[in-house]
Amino acid sequence: MKVGLFGANGRMGRVLVEALDLSEDAMLSVATVRDDSAWVGMNVGELAGIGKKPITCSPISSLQQDSADVMIDFTLPAVIESNLAWCVKNNMPVVIGTTGLNDTQLAALDEAAKQIPIVFAANYSVGVNLMLSLVRQAASVLGNTADIEITEAHHRYKQDAPSGTAMAIGEAIADELGRDLKTCAVYGREGKEPERDQGTIGFATVRAGDIVGEHTALFADIGERLEITHKASSRLTFAKGAVHAAQWLHGRKPGLYSMANVLGLPA
Ligand code: NAD
């Protein structure tokens, strides 16, 4: 199966090159970068630090319908709509890992999924997707008595906060408890605050150094607390998950699929 990359020169793009090189069933067929990028013509293997490979980075405008069977997009929200438009026009399935999408960009995703198959996940690691099931279970037992706080830490370059994964954890817990995250979320705290409202879900963010990604869901009552934590130590875990999702997506009918669908986990 031929897999193409949007944004091959990004932190995730480079690791996706490596994950595709490691895959026995999927192979990298095209690696795109911005038309004006200094990386056009650069060997992808050298870009990813895995030795010379037979593909060089090509400008995004050179992308053709037969360039790939499935595309993978880990770019930035600003380009998601144009990448989706290209996929729809060329009937191309796409795996999307870009996070921090606004309501308009999410609506564009829903619209595109009426015409092409899409996997969209805030996090492609198996452990985090298992965590999404575990927090639902914890919420169903403890959620109406415990205080719920979600903390996350990422590298200094991350541009969206809280992380898409932290938001997905919050959505899963709120959904399980019949709450609306839009009204019950509290983001950060500062200064004098009223006593904690038990119906809220708190979020706290750390941005520092080269932290790949850490998430904790805390359920705290008087006398005990439960913490469910996931720590990613390499971006390769996200990249391998995205390649797995691309293989799963190939040949599916149009629709918006989650990583839980890909892994066969309860949604
Ligand atoms: P990055 O900044 O290193 O890379 C961004 C990529 O987007 C680059 O290749 C860049 O060239 C491309 N890009 C930016 N502007 C562009 C434009 N105008 N036209 C075309 N391409 C453009 O970021 P990153 O750390 O690789 O993360 C990329 C995205 O993936 C982020 O949204 C991040 O939050 C997300 N992410 C998701 C997961 C997951 O499992 N879902 C894991 C890690 C990161």
Image (cartoon, grey):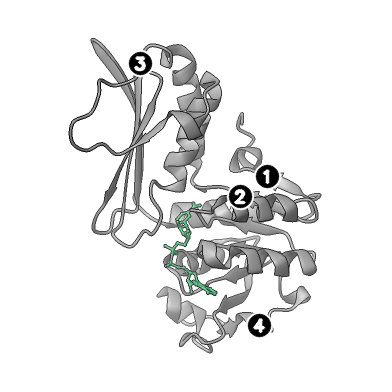
Q: Nearer the viewer, residue 114 or 137?
A: 114
Give the residue pinned by disc 4.
61
**Rounded to the nearest whole Å, what is the CA distance between mark 1 and mark 3?**
32 Å
**As shown in the figure, which amino acid type bears the numbered disc 4?**
Ser
Choose the circle earlier in sequence order: 1 or 3. Answer: 3
**Rounded to the nearest whole Å, what is the CA distance between mark 4 and mark 1?**
27 Å
Give the residue pinned by disc 3.
146
Give the residue pinned by disc 2.
120
**As shown in the figure, which amino acid type bears the numbered disc 2?**
Phe
Choose the circle earlier in sequence order: 4 or 1. Answer: 4
Instruction: Identify the residue at image location x=50%, y=24%.
Output: 136
**Rounded to the nearest whole Å, what is the CA distance between mark 3 and mark 2?**
31 Å
Work out whether 27 lies above or below 141: below
The numbered disc on residue 257 is 1
Choose the circle earlier in sequence order: 1 or 2. Answer: 2
Q: Nearer the viewer, mark 1 or mark 3?
A: 3
Instruction: Identify the residue at image location x=77%, y=74%.
Output: 65
Instruction: Identify the residue at image location x=21%, y=38%.
Output: 190
The numbered disc on residue 192 is none
Neighbourhood count class around disc 2 (C-alpha, 10 Å): few under 14, some 14–19, many 20 upward: many
**At numbered mark 2, what does the secondary structure look like: helix, strand or loop?**
strand
Choose the circle earlier in sequence order: 3 or 4. Answer: 4
**As shown in the figure, which amino acid type bears the numbered disc 1?**
Tyr
